[in-house]
Image: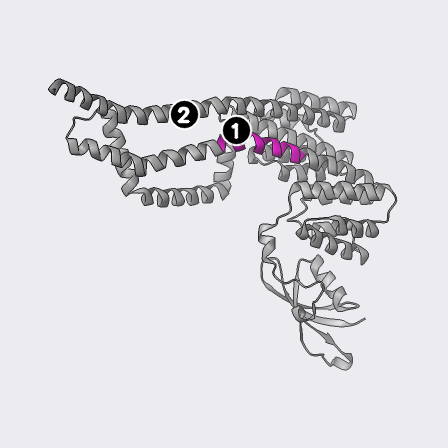
Amino acid sequence: MPVFEYSGKDATGRTVKGTLDADSVRGLKTILRRDKVFLTEYREAAAKGAKGQKVKAGGEQKAGSREVDFSELFNGISPQDIAEMTRQLATLLKATVPLVEALGAITEQVENPKLKRVMAKVRTDVNEGAPFWRSLAVHDRVFENTYYNMVRAGESAGNLDIVLLRLADFSESQVKLRNKLIGALTYPIIMLCISLLIVTGMMIFVVPTITAMFTDLGADLPLITKMLIAFSAALTKFWWLGVVGAFFAWRGFVRWKRSEAGAERWDKSILKIPVLGDLLRRIAIARFSRTLGTLLSSGVPLLTALEIVENVVANRILAKVVAEARNAIREGDNIAGPLKRSGEFPPMVVHMVAIGEKSGELEGMLRNIAESYENQVDTRVQALTSLLEPLMIVFMGVVVGFLVAAILLPMMKLTQAVQQGG
């Protein structure tokens, strides 16, 4: 087997050099790709210590070239793309189509060009003998750890088609929940942005013209009009200061939130916000239950499943509780105990988890919890949306009323002064 000396770049951009046995250059690239190393140069070591000429890896690539494609910057892979691909693959495997052929068919059917390239690489790896789950794990920016760990369990148990169907259901449920939240918040956010733009435009372009007329007439202006003039003048002259201040404030907030202490404090405080905090907690519990139930029913060991769920729950406070539950199970305890002691999970959830553990039906109980909380999230999001719309109308009414009052009151005073003078 040929011996290759190579150099490449790892995921951090660091140069990596070494020697590998591979049957071909393609095999060399496959081995390095599994180790997340991008081959840049190689040369084959010939017999008796002689060495071949160095070859630039990019110069050899044609069909599978890794040239920079700027369209990828604007063409991401959505969770919906992953869900549809997973269901199609599960259908093919259920019809006893071999995995490599099924991956080939999926690669041809996928419309997203970026996902098509990913699946082509996955098919190549599987065809060359790599486990399916490991081929997916290489693309960890596309496939979450939940995904490839479930695939790993399915491959080990020999029921990959069933696991993929569960994974498709799980992915679609997460997409539906996400779409509900985005759909519910889109209209209020758009209305708020339009309102702020209109008000800002009036304060910068309209109000100064009208207030200049009052100032030229030397009228005694009401307090509300003076406040409007002062605010408009500050916004007109120092708008750039507000933009710069907002930019640095946002940068500072992001940096603080990325720190360990800042992230934990933010996650703790956001759960205490009225209405929103309760909604976020229910979303996290639904995600916790759905993910853990799906992993367990797919054959993933409990400790491994809890480790995955710890990374899936998008709140550090709740993730700590999951970590405590994992440590407790390792020491012979159950899941319900740490959940109850934390006080972060509702008593009903703790009670249902405890019943599921005692009866051996934990997966079913977790599925029931997930369905219940997803329905509650749906109901509360609809209620929140119906509440936000009148609140937006009231907010706009107050703003418009303030502007109208600030402009009309001086006009009324001027009219009265003219009438009395006449």
108 vs 46, nearest the viewer: 108
Position above or below: 89 against 40: above
Position above or below: 8 against 367: below
Compared across the picture, whether 187 is left or right of 335 comes to left
Q: Amino acid at mark 1?
A: Leu
Q: Which residue is mark 1?
A: 271
User: How far apart are the alpha carbons under marks 1 and 2?
Assistant: 25 Å
Q: Residue 124, percent across and down?
A: 77, 57
Report the span colored magenta: 174-189
Q: Which comes before the other along the chain, label 1 or label 2?
A: 1
The quadrant of the picture occupied by the C terminus is: top left
Please identify the quarter of the rendering in which residue 246 is found. top left
Q: Which residue is mark 2?
A: 395
The quadrant of the picture occupied by the N terminus is: bottom right
176 part of magenta stretch: yes
Q: Residue at x 58, y 57 (%)?
A: 70
Q: How is the image coloured?
A: one colour
Compared across the picture, whether 387 is left or right of 214 comes to right
